[in-house]
Amino acid sequence: MSQTILIYGATGYTGRLVAMQARVTHLSFEIAGRNGPQVTALADELGVPCRIFALDDPETIIASLAGVTAVLNCAVPFASTARPLMEACIACGVHYLDITAEYKVYAWAEACSERAAAAGVMLLPGVGWDVVPSDCLAMYLAAKVDQPQSLRIALQIANSMSRGSTSSVGEILGVGLLVRAEGTIVAKLDAAPARFDFGAGLVDSVPLSFGDLVTAWKSTGIPNIAMFVNIKENVMPEGVAAMPEGPSLDERAANRACAVAEVTGIDGAVVRARIETVNGYSYTPLAAVEALRLVAAGQFNPGFQTPATVFGASFAVSSADTRIVDMA
């Protein structure tokens, strides 16, 4: 039986990179979006079918997903696009995937888990950078201590962001400072910065509320989780309108991605590791397309899932030029 994969939001910066990777790997797929001329032009360039629809009418979305096995959502901001696509996927039995780091999307997916499972649908947000590496790293470390009690994850942003990512950052900042404390998400306005070693010595990292507060809990059951980010100079844009669509190929090649995780066991034992890989904008297409390939081949679990719960802790290092480094 043929499997129809749909990449929604394929004309954006990262969406285009994902679609190009899907084409290079000979994945059978279609693209979709709301801008007819742009979607049609890209479909012609890639030599794939396309569907044109917006996300403001539930019946239209459901009709547009006819015959689709799985959707990969690349359209930002995900706070606006994820929920209508998730609801339509649940209604018509289609697996939902996306590439977001926005906390709200994971909270929605978690809240919809039982309905999705009853429909045989998997909700798998976060199949790119950062969640694939950080989720798998958390599971990798959790297995190394007795009854893991706390988890700290830190991401490093080393290059300029795309316009879409900038939009997502606004959504992430908008939820305020959150942590998971004894299994419950709580606000922590006084969350303090911390220092992490991304491979060149300890550097300051500030607290931020990423989707890992939900995914790491799902993947490991660790009750206390905090997230941090280290942002190098000249990364955050001063104005979205004036910034390029995304980092150039040379800029991506010059700036590798890194995430660090630290897990503490019930006996106080602490284990640390970092995951090093290609630039985040280069990693996302690799991980997302591989996730789509596996789902199309029948590897899925109904309900809300994470990359590690579906594909295992080794999924993150299945992408080229990626490794986990254990730290003292």
Image (cartoon, grey):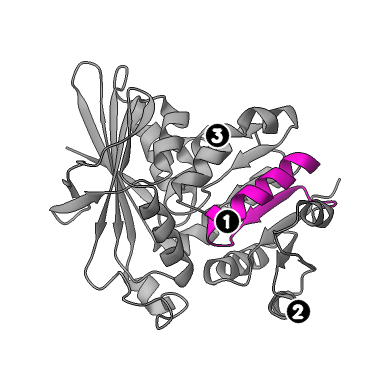
Is residue 93 visible to us here?
no
Give the mark count.
Answer: 3
Return the residue at label 3. Answer: 110
Of label 2 and label 1, which has the lower sequence position? 2
* Secondary structure of the residue carrying numbered label 1: helix
**Residue 76, image x and y in percent?**
54, 62
Q: In the image, which residues are magenta?
A: 66-92
191 relative position to 21: left or right: left
Q: Quadrant of residue 55?
A: bottom right
Quadrant position of the C terminus in the picture: top left
* Secondary structure of the residue carrying numbered label 3: helix
Seen from the viewer's position, the closer of residues 136 and 95 is 95
Write the residue at 85% across / 51% down.
67
| Within-10-Å neighbours for mark 3: few <14, some 14–19, many 20+ | some
Write the residue at 86% across / 45% down.
1
User: Marks 2 and 1, Cα distance to the nearest angstrom?
Assistant: 28 Å
Give the numbered dot on residue 44.
Answer: 2
**Residue 185, image x and y in percent?**
38, 32
